[in-house]
Image: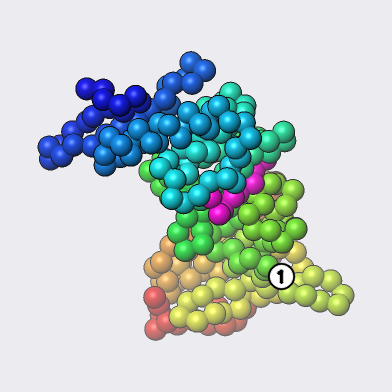
Amino acid sequence: MQSLPGVYESVKKNGQKYYRSSITYDGRHISLGSFESSILAHNGYLLAKKIISSPQLTIYDYEDHMCLAFDKWVVLMNYRDHHYYFSTPIYMHKNYFSYFISYTEELIFDIQDLFYYANHKIHKRKGYYFVNDYGMQVNIMSRYGVKNHSVLGRDHRFVDGDIHNLRYDNIQVINPYYGVILERSLVAPIYKSTLNIHGNYVIGRYKDSATAAIAYNKAIDYLHKNGIIQKDFPKNYIADMNQETYAAIYKKVKISNKILDLKKSSTN
């Protein structure tokens, strides 16, 4: 039953009452969330009315004591200014959009990712951003070819130094492969391939990253074949390389004696 304007009483499964608030604006019915009391729900409704009628209000005018959740604040402002409704806290700009993790944390994306993040809520845990996709937690950096093992500054970097700028031209993948590290050299870059089996073992050093990645795969195959490891290590996929070229490099590439001489006593 409706009480105050914009407020609807509901009942939880345990019989406890709570109150929902919503507003209709420009033909769109927008949920404002759930509240413990009808007064709080009504206050949320009144604030929503103020937002849609006050173009001078901006995203950055939000304060943490307000009666609307910040994501609802963003949703309303984006719909007010651009007439696009998203359930996630997105605010559109001309050639990019902002996704607000909180009112103090704003991520920037290229407009081509708009549909994806309009349908995937971003979560943050221990400094990492991820979405739930097909029942799996997916690190959003994987959309740029950045692996989960990737180390910032070594395997990838942000061109302008801003980790919140997630536009494609701001993310540079230095090394896309497992077990491969770029070593600086005065003459030419050298790629070191390593594998951690109760400690780091150097597989070898190679002139290019693809060869180092294939050497890593070959070392894993060798160790599996000889019963030295049982763990399923992730293997490298070499994009833009056909099977014949891969097989030729795989056959030719050498791996270190430290790998070849490992005994079964070192199994994990």
Q: Looking at this rendering, what residue extends furthest in the top direction? A: 27
Residue labelled with disc 1:
182
Expressed as whole percent of the image width and height from the top left, the position of residue 78 reads 57, 32
Residue shown at 57% from the left, 57% from the top: 147
Q: Which residues are magenta?
A: 103-110
In this view, the residue farthest toward the left is 15
Q: Using the rendered view, name the quadrant where residue 37 is placed.
A: top left
Residue that appears at 57% across and 45% down: 61
What residue type is disc 1 on? Leu
Quadrant location, the C terminus: bottom left
Front residue of 22 and 4 = 4
Vertical order, 213 against 185 (above or below): above
Q: Position of residue 141 (x, y in %)?
A: 58, 52
Q: Residue at x 57, y 82 (%)?
A: 258
Location of residue 201 (image quadrant): bottom right
**Above or below: residue 250 compared with residue 266:** above
Q: Residues within 10 Å of mark 1 (few under 14, many from 20)?
A: many
* Quarter where residue 260 is shown: bottom right
